[in-house]
């Protein structure tokens, strides 16, 4: 009956089962194990337990991490930084359409792993040759998704807290747009998408429906919802037509009243204008007669002087 223990290599990463190998292990212990990539440092997150049978052979825990192992991990940080800078330089020099995310080196430095994202498949054989010739070790290129990229880099979500995938989510469960519709959320790209550009994982937290009925696949977020817009336009058209029918007769009465008032004002204005015109004509005649009298007076004076 083997005795197994659960070990995690990264924060909020997956938990893997290893053979405890009769070591006095307890949770939060740092141990050295032989993973698929080589010697790696892990943390015990599940205490030892016995199982009757296991479907596949388990790798053993080599030892509890010593001070030398911890120092080796610290020194590898400089190697990882150098590998990241050099790989980024070669990617730019070759004009490759890929984004380098991070690098990771094993404790014994027998392998360096490069994580990157790309839209499609990338032919990186020449890049691997450059890296192997420079670092003299085994090079492994691993293409990851945008969700894994956010998990590695980290960040702050629109809720103001650290991303769920960086804190406690160990696996990425599929999220569907139907979850947002059932929760009556606004179908807005900025509000439903996370830093990775996909639907936010928290849409599943408050989904009360049956997950089997939902197409659990990453779906694109719709820019608009034409059905809702058509219904809204039809509703607005009905409301406007109803308002026009109800207010049609009062508006006509009001228009007639205004027309009558305008006619009265216009007739009064015409009478006033006639009186003003008569007054102006009389004044004009008086002024013209005075002008003529003055002209005759001056002519008579000239005649008498001669």
Image (tube, helix red, strand yellow):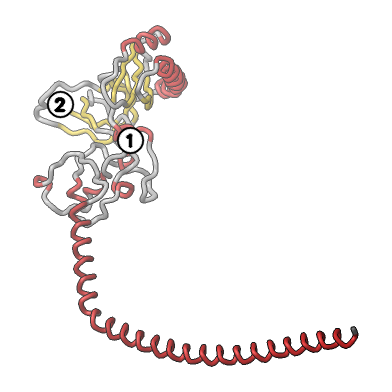
Decide which of 75, 171 is in the foreground and name it.
171
**Label drawn at residue 2:** 2
Secondary element at tag 1:
helix
Decide which of 206, 47 is in the foreground and name it.
206
Quadrant of the image occupied by residue 149: top left
Decide which of 185, 43 is in the foreground and name it.
185
The count of marks equals 2
Given the current orientation, which residue lies at the most extreme front position? 306
Quadrant of the image occupied by residue 232: bottom left
Q: Does residue 277 lie above or below 136 as drawn?
A: below
Q: x, y percentage for residue 173? A: 20, 40
Q: x, y percentage for residue 172? A: 23, 38
Residue at figure coordinates x 21%, y 66% from the top left: 237
Left or right, 41 with respect to 184, comes to: right
> Looking at the image, is mark 2 or mark 1 earlier in the sequence?
2
Residue at figure coordinates x 32%, y 50% from the top left: 191
Q: Which residue is mark 1?
A: 151
């Amino acid at each position: 009956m083997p005795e197994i223990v659960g070990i995690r290599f990264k924060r909020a990463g997956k938990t893997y089962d290893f053979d405890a190998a009769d070591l006095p292990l307890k949770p939060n212990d740092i141990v050295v194990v032989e993973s698929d990539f080589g010697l790696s440092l892990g943390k015990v997150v599940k205490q030892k337990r016995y199982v009757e049978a296991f479907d596949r052979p388990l790798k053993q825990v080599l030892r509890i991490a010593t001070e030398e192992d911890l120092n080796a991990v610290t020194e590898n940080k400089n190697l990882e930084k150098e590998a990241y800078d050099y790989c980024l330089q070669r990617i730019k020099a070759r004009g490759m359409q890929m984004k380098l995310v991070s690098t990771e080196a094993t404790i014994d430095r027998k392998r360096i792993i490069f994580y990157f994202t790309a839209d499609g498949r990338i032919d990186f054989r020449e890049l691997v040759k450059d890296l192997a010739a420079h670092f003299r070790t085994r090079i492994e290129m691993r293409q990851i998704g945008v969700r894994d990229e956010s998990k590695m880099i980290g960040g702050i979500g629109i809720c103001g807290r650290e991303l769920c995938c960086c804190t406690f989510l160990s696996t990425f469960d599929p999220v569907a747009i139907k979850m947002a519709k059932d929760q009556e959320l606004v179908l807005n790209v900025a509000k439903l998408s996370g830093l990775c550009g996909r639907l936010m994982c928290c849409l599943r937290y408050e989904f009360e429906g049956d997950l089997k009925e939902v197409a659990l696949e990453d779906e694109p977020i719709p820019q608009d919802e034409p059905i809702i817009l058509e219904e809204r336009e039809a509703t607005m058209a009905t409301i406007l037509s109803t308002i026009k029918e109800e207010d049609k007769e009062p508006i006509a009465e009001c228009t007639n009243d205004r027309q009558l008032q305008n006619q009265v004002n216009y007739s009064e204005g015409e009478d006033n204008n006639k009186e003003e015109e008569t007054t102006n004509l009389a004044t004009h005649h008086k002024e013209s007669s005075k002008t003529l009298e003055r002209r005759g007076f001056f002519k008579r004076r000239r005649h008498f002087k001669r």
